[in-house]
Image (cartoon, rainbow, N blue to C red):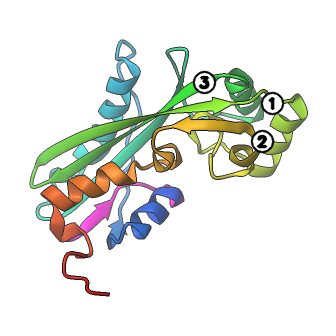
Amino acid sequence: MKVILASQSPRRRELLSHMGVSFDVIVRGVDEYFPKQLAPVDAVRYIAENKAAVFKTEITDELVIAADTIVVIEGQILGKPKDRVDAVEMLTRLSGKKHEVITAVALLHKGSVHTFHEVTEVYFRKLTEGEMGYYVDHYRPYDKAGGYGIQEWVGMVAIEKIVGSYTNVVGLPTQQLYHILKTTYPGALVSTDDYKG
């Protein structure tokens, strides 16, 4: 089965490759708007489904994988920071607190969309102004929800613990995705059933 990843994220590309999925990357511009009355889980699912739905008229037998990740603290969604001030402000809000990272994945195949999501709790220790400034200036996390990447410096020094999937925080809940691909779209995976070693 031919697989299309509808994402520019290098982290999602890397994770999907490590899962043993062969894929092409095709991205269509999608407005990441969502109705403001939606709860965070519904909002991220709405965006992921829109990212997949733009392929409905052009894709037939291929499987399209689209995803979106948000950071939620105290019920409020943190998107991608607009600039340095915004990024530092987001880290200030996360500092010393627990937040949630929610990734929704929408799978489009033969006109039908299957959507699922995963939630991971992330606990930050208290950060100093210098640490936040250092991270933003050296890693420029302007393409990352919540203004940080768990796989980067800030993840090494500031995250006390996580509850749930690590790869979900990176941008793709690989364990859940693998299970769904294996049970519903087995042609998308490298077969391991007959592996003898």
- Number of the label disc, if any, that sits on residue 127: 1
SS category of the residue bearing label 3: strand
7 magenta-colored: yes
Q: Residue at x 57, y 26 (%)?
A: 99
The residue to which callout 3 is attached is 98
170 magenta-colored: no
Q: What's the residue type where badge 2 is placed?
A: Val
- Number of the label disc, if any, that sits on residue 136: 2
Q: Quadrant of the N terminus?
A: bottom left
N-terminal label among 2 and 3: 3
Residue 38 as seen in the image, left or right of residue 127: left
Residue 66: percent from left, percent from top: 33, 49
Distance, label 1 to label 3, CA atoms, is 13 Å
Q: What's the residue type where badge 3 is placed?
A: Lys
Which residue is the extreme one toward the top?
Answer: 37
Distance, label 2 to label 1, CA atoms, is 13 Å
- Magenta residues (range): 2-10
Q: Residue at x 26, y 86 (%)?
A: 196
Residue 11 as seen in the image, left or right of residue 26: right
Q: Residue at x 81, y 30 (%)?
A: 127
SS category of the residue bearing label 2: helix
- Front disc: 2 or 3: 3
